[in-house]
Image (cartoon, rainbow, N blue to C red):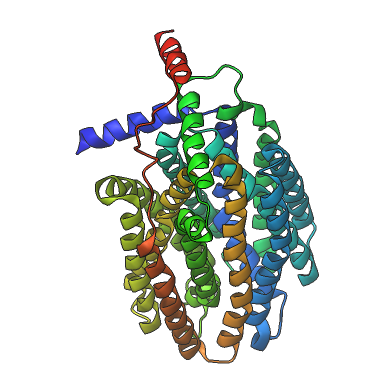
Amino acid sequence: MLNRIRNTSSESWKLVKGLNLNLKLYFGGWAIISLVQTPLYLSTFFLIGLWIPDESIRNTQIGLIFGMSSIIGIVGLIISGLISDKWRRDAFIWMGMVIYIAAMIYFLFATRIADLYVIQIFQAIAGSLMMPAGAALIADCTAKGTRTKIYTLMAIIQQLSTAIGGVAGFFIFRYVGDRYEVSVIMPVIRICAVVIMIASLGGFFIHDKRSLQAKEEETAKSLEEKRKNELIVQKLKSCKTFRQKLKFYRTPLLIVLADFLIAFGAGISIPFLPRYFEDTSGSYGVKLSELTLIFTLAPLLTAVISGIALYIGKKIGRAKAIFWIELLAVGLLFCFAIFPPLSIILVIYIFRQALMNAGWPLINAIVMDLLPSNQRASFSAIDSLAFTAFNSISQPIGGKILDNNNYYSGFRFAFISTGLIYFVGVFMLFFIKEGSFETEKVEGTEQDKEAIEIITKN
């Protein structure tokens, strides 16, 4: 067992060292940003509540702010998804970084609820510009046979960074006062904003010329990747009828439809989990520092389960692994509605969050393997659009449900609704297929074979 862990760690380190510089910059930037992700999210969540004195509309307003910012971000997703496949990936990342930094500067001087509306809109637009281009950039910079490992490695690095930052947030909140007050929360927000601005600077050194497919000196991997992409394009061109094209896009379409449902279900309850643990009128009433630590442990376990999911995917197939992992997460979600003791609900929360998030590297890898390179950013945008649109619609609905009911009946209805909708969405993933291109032996042209042999010998 120890030897397996040692070998896995050694392989992961070699994989990190061998990453394209674009990937090192992209992963490194998001790893640093992930350090402050939990403290910033929780601080923003409770700051909104503190700046809304009327308790009867507090949760509705929280849902409205996060939901409205997502709707605004949809415009950016449409534009970036359609254009970044035909234009430069790096330009969209640069634009996103500029807007993201502007949002963090605004955070430094925020004094009222209207400021938070503007900041959330800025962040949504920045994310919508960077997500499709970033997902496509990762695929462009990696050979097909290594994508699953790369996406999993990226998830593990981000989750570990989130966990480390959450632990730091625990001590910071303890130091500044550990109270749900503006005077305690704003210093933490300013620290997070400065860290994000510094980390974002690395994104301006990302350049499309470093992408695997854009290298002037081609390697054996890039030639093989190019040939596999040609196979996908040829397969798509051979689809003459609508039914054939529908079959070709079957897995991406099912994933988008599943994300529609999962996103809508998530918005009803998941954004309000901090209130579920914090509300003194309910079962738990945990402190701000303790809440930060709770939200930290889930990403830490996600990193572990992501690695396990990769192993399971090799044994039973990535598609099956995704389905069973997320189905287990749905089952755990229903446990929230019975309000078990704090020690039990913490274990349930940590495992549910980890299981629900562990499958996305496998999903990303499957889709990027099945689509031609000039459609990857478009799909990423469509998928993000599906999730963002429906999540933004349901968040105000979830807030309204909580405001119109007491703690127990409100959260019970919210979690049961989310669980039922999740089940339908996850069940759709049972029908996805990962295709054969990942392991397919590619029959290249004689010129390709000769080029690969010469490069390999040299």
Which of the 4 image quarters holds residue 432?
A: bottom left
Query: What's the residue at 49%, 82% (across, down)?
Result: 414
Q: Is residue 227 above or below residue 338?
A: above
Q: Is residue 31 above or below residue 245?
A: above
Query: Is residue 125 visible from the viewing direction of this image?
Result: yes
Q: Does residue 252 appear to the left or right of 301 in the view shown?
A: right
Which of the 4 image quarters holds residue 116?
A: bottom right
Seen from the viewer's position, the closer of residues 128 and 167 is 128
Q: Position of residue 165 (x, y in %)?
A: 52, 49
Q: Position of residue 233 (x, y in %)?
A: 53, 41
Q: Does residue 240 appear to the left or right of 102 in the view shown?
A: left
Query: What's the residue at 75%, 54% (across, down)?
Result: 103
Q: Does residue 219 appear to the left or right of 341 in the view shown?
A: right
Seen from the viewer's position, the closer of residues 321 and 299 is 321
Q: Is residue 221 above or below residue 61?
A: above
Which of the 4 image quarters holds residue 220?
A: top left
Q: Position of residue 309 (x, y in %)?
A: 33, 50
Query: What's the residue at 38%, 81% (across, down)?
Result: 339
Seen from the viewer's position, the closer of residues 53 and 218 is 218
Query: What's the residue at 46%, 30% (across, down)?
Result: 16
Q: Position of residue 238 (x, y in %)?
A: 50, 46
Query: Is residue 123 visible from the viewing direction of this image?
Result: no
